[in-house]
Amino acid sequence: MNIESISLSGRKKMVSNKEMTFLEKMYLVAIIKGLFITIKHLFRRKVTIQYPEQVREMSPVYRGQHQLKRDEEGRENCTACGLCALSCPAEAITMKAEERKADEKHLYREEKYASIYEINMLRCIFCGLCEEACPKDAIYLTTSKVLVPASYEREDFIFGKDKLVMPLDVAIRNAQLKNAN
Amino acid sequence: MIDSTIIIEKSVIIVAVFAITMVMAMYSTLAERKIAAWLQDRIGPNRAGKGGILQPLADGLKLFSKEEFEPNTPNRFLFFVGPAIAMSTALMTSAVIPWGDKLHLFGRDIILQATDIDVALLYIFGVVSVGVYGIMIGGWASNNKFSLMGAVRAASQMVSYEVAMGLSMIALLMMTGTLSLREISAQQAGMNWNVFYQPVSFLIFLICAFAETNRTPFDLAECESELIGGYHTEYSSMKMGFYLFAEYANMFISSTILAVLFFGGYNYPGMSWAVENWGVNSANVIGIVVLFSKICGFIFFYMWVRWTIPRFRYDQLMHLGWRILIPLSIVNIIITGIVILRHDIMVYLGL
Ligand code: SF4
Ligand code: SF4
């Protein structure tokens, strides 16, 4: 085996620059062949998904909008350890930690919490690494199909705690469901 | 028999033909998008009306409501004349097409043709070659290099392919012996279609028709990848719509001409039987339907080709026109001549 005939991809093709014959120069044979190929596609099954009526099935590991979880008592799980920010390949997460006051025990589960927690949705690639990194089960990528809504302002894409933290009533409902089971 | 009824009769036919051309051109735009979609395994526009049937109206409305933009050009007049020429020449050719033989209504024979001039084919060639002025003037008056380039390409392409087209016609005319489309249609009664006698001529004419209508693979005049939009880059709103519309009207007309010249026009096998048994009117209505299905077939073919093959390179285009099609059509003329004069030649050679 010599070096010229080795093909790593298996798709190597010799380029030939031979003169076309008169028949080939009329292109007719090639065109007719092409016409047969396209006409076959006329009868193929169409791949279009009629979007608003038909929705493509989501993958079971679909990763949508982030959510900062609350526990059963409605307290925020996040302890502002910063592991999510560290693991984020897109460097989308920033936060500011604060110590929990004595009268805030019902608000935050850990002694330290994130007073500011922001994800820049223009940077985020929805890889889910933040979710994997979190030791406190605090951040999850939900299956919500509503992703970042369009906007004219760049600032609108930096989601703060107002958009990220799980609503309190949802947390209460979850707790009730769990107790019922 | 020049009387007032003939004026009414002809006006009705002219209006009908005009309306049909418009409707066909309108729905060709929808058909184009649908066929493009189907050939690419898609569904195509289907939101406006059932199955997208109102899409052309929506497109037209959109074009109407667009801003009318004018480039800073010294030839403002010509800028307006360009699309007008393109549109009017596209509509003028349909005047000489025989849509059917005749209808018998109100006690008189109505010939289904706006005018039966005996140089119909020559008239069509003349009008079609004026059509290129629409593109040239528009491109030139746009005061834009890309438009000019597109216009120059269109002009040279049309001029080159008109030669081959004319020559391919000569072989056919030697056989038919007339330029009147009505007589040519009548000669092809039954299945006596010219395509069976002149296949090479048909092929050359078909290729040239693609070139004359600026359709892929010969759409160098408006190739997006090189020239933005070609000659209509600077046009917007309905002026742009006129150019696009003219293209589709041209496609309809050239499909009609192909059907009339080579595929027997309104003739179908058993037409004379139908005339005897079902009467002139129903036989001819079927004839019109047959002609239109042939036309639709050709329009489909145009679109099918468009979505199959890529655009020719400019040198390939010229090469194909001058060095292949023209010699081929000349050879075709010679062979046709020999076949027509075979008895005389035999006698001359003493066979
Ligand atoms: S999903 Fe990935 S990119 Fe987005 S914030 Fe989490 S780690 Fe960063
Ligand atoms: S979300 Fe999890 S990983 Fe991120 S700061 Fe809070 S606790 Fe730490």
Image (cartoon, rainbow, N blue to C red):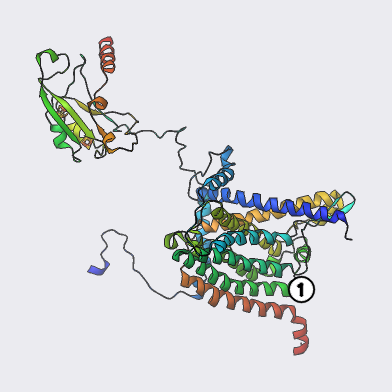
Q: Please indicate, yes or no, whether residue B218 appears anywhere in the rendered image.
A: no
How far across and how far down the image is residue A11, in percent?
A: 32, 60
Is residue B295 shown left or right of residue B344? left
Quarter of the N terminus of chain A within the rendering: bottom left
- Classify residue B184 by image quadrant: bottom right
Query: Compared with residue B129, is residue B232 higher up or lower down, i.e. above or below?
Result: above
Ligand 1 shows up in which quadrant of the image? Answer: top left
Residue occupied by mark 1:
B177
Query: Compared with residue B134, is residue A100 higher up or lower down, i.e. above or below?
Result: above
Callout 1, which amino acid? Gly
Q: Nearer the viewer, residue B126 or A110?
A: B126
How far across and how far down the image is residue A56, in percent?
A: 40, 35
Quarter of the C terminus of chain A within the rendering: top left
Q: Residues within 10 Å of mark 1 (few under 14, many from 20)?
A: few
How far across and how far down the image is residue A12, in percent?
A: 31, 63
Q: Nearer the viewer, residue B214 or B140?
A: B140
How far across and how far down the image is residue B54, in percent?
A: 59, 41
- Classify residue B273 by image quadrant: bottom right
Query: Compared with residue B131, is residue A120 higher up or lower down, i.e. above or below?
Result: above
Provide the secondary structure element on which disc 1 rests: loop
> Residue at coordinates 11% horizontally, 29% vertically from top-left?
A81
Q: Please indicate, yes or no, whether residue B22 appears anywhere in the rendered image.
A: yes
Question: Which chain letter goes with mark 1?
Answer: B
Q: Nearer the viewer, residue A163 or B267?
A: A163
> Residue at coordinates 48% horizontally, 67% vertically from top-left?
B148
Ligand 1 has an atom within 8 Å of the beta carbon of the residue at disc 1: no
